[in-house]
Image: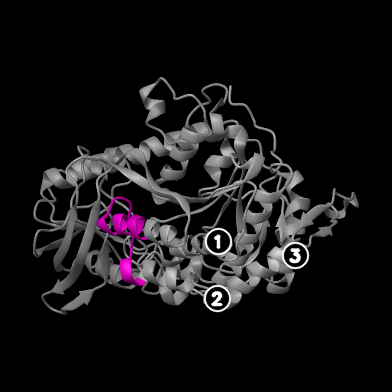
Amino acid sequence: MLKRCLIVVCLGASGLVAAAEPVDLDMVSRIRQEAFHNSQVMATFSHLTEDIGARLTNSPQMAEANAWTRGRFKEWGLANVHDEAFDDFGRGWEFSSATVEMLDGRTQPLHALPKAWTPGTDGPVEGELVQVNIKKLADIETWRGKLGGKILLLGEAREYKRATASDSHRHDATSLEGLQEFTIPKSSANERSKRVKEYEERLELAKAVNTLFAEEGALAAISISSWDNGIIRVAGGGSRKAGEPVGIPELAMIAEHFNPLARALENKQTVKLRVNVAARFTDETNQPGYNTLAEIPGSGRKAAEIVMLGAHLDSWHTGTGAADNAAGVAVMMEAMRILKAVGARPDRTIRVALWSGEEQGLIGSQDYVSRHFAAYPEPAEPAQKALPGSLRNPTGPLQKKRDYDRFSVYFNMDNGSGRFRGIYAQENLAAVPIFEAWLAPFHDVGATTVATRNTGSTDHIPFDRVGLPGFQFIQDRLDYFTNVHHSHLDTWDHVEPEDLKQAAAIVASFAYHAAMREERMPRKPVLERD
């Protein structure tokens, strides 16, 4: 018979003693042994990053990743392994090479990489460089008739700012204590309208600029990376949707090479470049995207209830999607492997989801939640329907699906590859003492903190929006937001293997205890959107 330890915790400084939360220390010990001494997390992580590489949604590499992860789940003995489609994501895209060279006078290679879903050059093209600055629709007409056969430098030079702190960071007692502070949100009655207006204007301008550049016959366009120190930070351009204007070949260039080009043009010098981008759309028509799922089936009367864990399998295209988010995928896969390896027989079903389309707005996880659990009614107005879910006007009461009341909790990892320091409770105060109890056996490996505050921008949010408990772990930042995030440096070498082992042990333990609780995880009130 398994031994259980009843850990009694206090809720913050109030001194109110919460109900005893059982923690199965025998199971935690087995999980730790498997996670720390027989880990396979780096083998999984290495295959995703160094064998498959970048995994842009709907690219051939993403299809390979879906297939490979399904294969691993089956090898480990998981059940109900399958891909689930979400509709009309768009076209696949990939690139194999990109070069930019300065010609005439001082010749040199310039470091730049293409934006996703922009066309290739179909061989090398050469042209004079012209600086173009279009900030609003009215600026477009000033450039008509001036861009044919030119290579465009988009925007202006940026002053270099030296770092004032280390580019890699781990939490300490002071920073973890700061996470305990909750900031009361300010009133924002007009915030949604403002964000909608900015989104629509940005989208309209991008389409108009793409159309202008293509109609003018410009050869290529170059913008500045948003980070300094030789880092190419780049995401998407053009359009992934068939039938929409994709513009011309467009690249992001390191600031230290962009700035001299801008200064030369400001000094009235003639600059000629050669650009060669091998990139292609892999589909002619819009295609669905795919999430990959697998389960450890529950047993007994709670088998129909669901505990979920997940991470997004897709990435951007210039690195190898290591910290964002092969790290999270490897941890969640390892947690499932650990549970199988230690012989866990959960009361509830434990389901893992590897999402796609996260980088384009949580598309895969949002679709899954809408299909299986709950959704707000689709808006009738085409303009509203075209907006992301987070920007739409309220459309009526929440429409719950069959599995809404069978759902217990979702755990997510997508804040880089750093060590877990605790978990964000997402304003679910009833979850705080539960998490404090579950974290207690991991204090010795640095996971100590339960913060009541929210964190956003990743795949737990679709669950949270419909009133389902969805949580993200607190992690050490390392150099995620200084060197790695959406950059060509998002590679294996920026990840700490021991951090991933620790994270996998905690996820496995949290999933197991959520599956074994007498009650489902408590839910916070749903704010109705009338």
Location of residue 30 (image quadrant): bottom right
Amino acid found under the numbered disc labelled 2: Asn
Residue that appears at 65% across and 36% down: 187
**Residue 230, how many percent across, how many down?**
36, 74
Q: Which mark is first along the chain, 1 or 2?
A: 2
In the picture provided, is 53 more to the left or to the right than 441?
A: left
Residue pointed to by mark 1: 340
Observer able to see residue 123:
yes
Observer able to see residue 175:
no
Q: Is mark 2 on a helix, strand or loop?
A: loop
* Spatial separation of the CA atoms under disc 1 and disc 3: 17 Å
Q: Is mark 3 on a helix, strand or loop?
A: helix
Residue that appears at 12% across and 46% down: 216
Residue pointed to by mark 2: 38
Residue that appears at 16% across and 68% down: 271
Residue 72 magenta: no
Q: What element carries label 1?
A: helix
Q: Do the residues labelled 2 and 1 touch (CB within 8 Å)?
A: no
Which tag is nearer the camera, tag 2 or tag 1? 1
In the picture provided, is 493 more to the left or to the right than 114?
A: right
**Residue 452, how many percent across, how many down?**
72, 50
Amino acid found under the numbered disc labelled 1: Lys
* Spatial separation of the CA atoms under disc 2 and disc 3: 19 Å
Residue pointed to by mark 3: 25
Amino acid found under the numbered disc labelled 3: Leu
In the picture provided, is 59 more to the left or to the right than 359?
A: left
Residue 59 magenta: yes
Read off the magenta span: 50-68
